[in-house]
Amino acid sequence: MTDRVVVAAAVYDRGRLLAARRSAPADIAGRWELPGGKLEAGESAEGGLLRELREELGVEAEILNRIPGEWPLNSGYVLRVWTARLVSGEPQPLEDHDALRWLSPDETDTVDWLDQDRPAVAEAARQLRRARGAFRSEADADAGEQGAERGESSV
């Protein structure tokens, strides 16, 4: 028997992660999650995730990579999470959410995440920090090369 799957996205834009506050059901309303939803019959995980992001947020995204692991949910579902890059649109809380927040990797602990989202959020924040560090390293290297071309020292 295959598990029933809920897909979610750690949506990145400009070095930030998108958090969505649940509006229902009552037992989780007010807590934060990574946006996504249940797969429909015959739907691929990536296709379902893109559909959910369009429906819930009104955005287009590019799926990047799967965050390792899966987390049990109610009624026999499991949560699987991917990272995704915002391609177009400004996220709006269209379905299931009443607020959205962009968080830097160092701000992810400022919201009350649903328990099953916490491990994926932690990994997404780690990936954002690494990417930011790689970007800085590339920028530093480029600045050093440009300085060397002008006869400047980086020391």
Image (tube, rainbow, N blue to C red):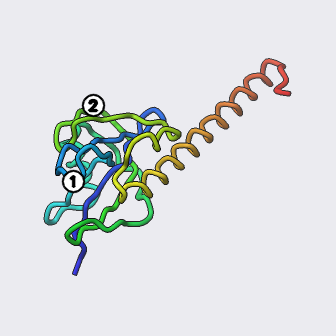
Q: Position of residue 9 (x, y in %)?
A: 34, 50
The residue beneath circle 2 is: 89
For label 2, count other residues whose C-alpha is less than 10 Å away and answer few (under 14), some (14-19) or many (20+). few
Q: In this rendering, would 141 be left or right of 26?
A: right
Vertical placement of 80 versus 142: above or below? below
Residue marked by disc 1: 27
Q: Is residue 146 above or below residue 36?
A: above
Q: Is residue 84 visible?
A: no
Q: Is residue 102 visible?
A: yes
Q: Amino acid at mark 2?
A: Gly
Residue type of the residue flagged with mark 1: Asp
Q: Residue at x 39, y 42 (%)?
A: 111
> Quarter holding the N terminus?
bottom left
Q: Nearer the viewer, mark 2 or mark 1?
A: 1
Q: Among all residues in the image, which is located at the extreme top?
A: 150
Residue 18 location, x and y as percent?
37, 39
Quadrant of res 42: bottom left
The residue that appears at 35% across and 34% down in the rendered structure is 101
- Residue lying at the far left in this picture: please name it: 41
**61 vs 140: above or below:** below
